[in-house]
Image: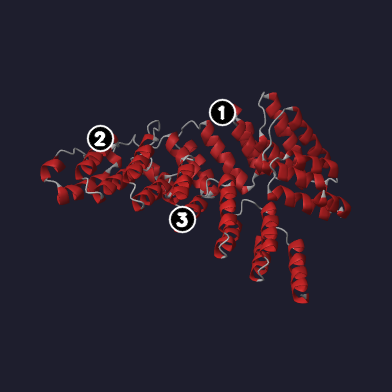
Amino acid sequence: MMYKVRKRKEYEDVIRRQRQNIGSWVKYAQWEASQQEFRRARSIFERALHVEYQNVSLWLKYLEMEMKNKFVNHARNLFDRVVQLLPRVDQFWYKYAYMEELLANYAGARTIYERWMEWEPDDNPWLQYVKFEERCGELDKARKALKTRLRSWSDMSAAGPRNRFYIKFAQFEQRQREMERAQAIFKLALDILPKGASDELYRAYVSFEKQHGDRDAIEEVDLRRDDLDPQVSQGLLAQAFQRPSEAFQLLSHAPSTRLRPTVLGYNAVMSACSRQQSWREALETMSFIERDALQPTIRSFNGCLSAYAKARHWARALRLLDEMPKRQVRPDLMSFNSTLSSTKSSWQQVCRLLASMEDQKMLPDTVSYTAAMGAAERSQRWCLVVALLQDMSNKQIEPDLMWYTSCISALAKAHCWTLALAALEQAKPADLMCYNATISALAEGHQWTRADAWLNG
């Protein structure tokens, strides 16, 4: 018993000194789990998530503990939370669906895939969904998923990763012995895709006809593979969604080739690099737009501002935001939110940005106020925290649970205990992160009587 007390004190001392070191939190939680103290381990993981809820590794360790010890319902609840908070991280969706498939809960796995596809992910998740339906013997559903993905491109000017996706679709039909369907898919793709961007598709079609067709069918395809259309950039940028670094290298050498990307192509690469946390490449892509004398769009500027936010270059983000009107591009809500996220602890700039939004008759949303609240908290401007809370209430903006968590933490540090507890009451239904924020705040403020009364109330 004394051993556990001593170890807990050691771990608590470590995380008090190094609160931002997520590795220390994970070691503490894993130690509790090794002692079969799973409730304590969960509490520690939740406290760590309050420190950095966007840490993918932290969520994975938390999920690993629940799955390793066969707490299936706890794991499901965690997966449901993380795919709502971080829906663009494919790894969580993969693991969630795979767990349900291992448990033979095929209907549940299918529901997860359907939820995932609503976020319009890249090709790989769609192909995983198709493979799942194929394993389940639901070929019609697999075919429907493939067609749905193709229809999602109907309004897109970029060729995107269509080349390989059509090949995968044709290969799926080949596995089902539907050779006529496969041939029709190849021919349709060759008619639709730009000539200079379909070499790989052409080779796959030739190989298919050599195995299952005849030479006459091959000769019908007029590709002229050596005739590269310099205006077709989207097909050559197909890899932007799957291999951003390669697409970036392709753009960097564009002046020395016949490739003439449009601003849409540059935007696609910038977004892909930003999603991969490659903010330097995303920023340099903006310089390529200027190099080629193209007119940046609002999406170009927002991609650049998002990269600045990830790099925490708030001064550069502010300069770019100020420059946008001079270049005939009006900032939108996403522009301001990205800039607010980059300000971190500059509360003066937060006030300036919110005032600028008001001048432009632009209503801030929950993301705007959450970023502003974080900056006010880090700069210890407690009066600004209260003012933001009142302003949000006056504008009747509906907050989410992440906003409540940040708000409770900030109000508690400002010693506004009554407002913090009132915020928790409004967070219905409040999640565990909100409760942990309240408990931690009351404990840090030595409000033991309030904490005890609240817990037992």
What residue is pinned by disc 1? 327
Say which residue appears at 70% left-offset and 58% top-offset.
43
Label 2: element kind: helix
Q: Quadrant of residue 221?
A: top left
Percent of width and height locating residue 31: 66, 69
What residue is pinned by disc 2? 191
Percent of width and height locating residue 69: 57, 65
Look at the image and tell me in which quarter the N terminus lies: bottom right
Marks 3 and 2 sit apart, C-alpha to C-alpha, by: 37 Å
Who comes first in sequence, dot 3 or dot 2? 3
Label 1: element kind: helix
* Number of the front mark, 3 or 2: 3
The one nearer the camera, 282 or 203, is 203
**Marker disc for residue 49:** none
The one nearer the camera, 45 or 324, is 45
Who comes first in sequence, dot 3 or dot 1? 3
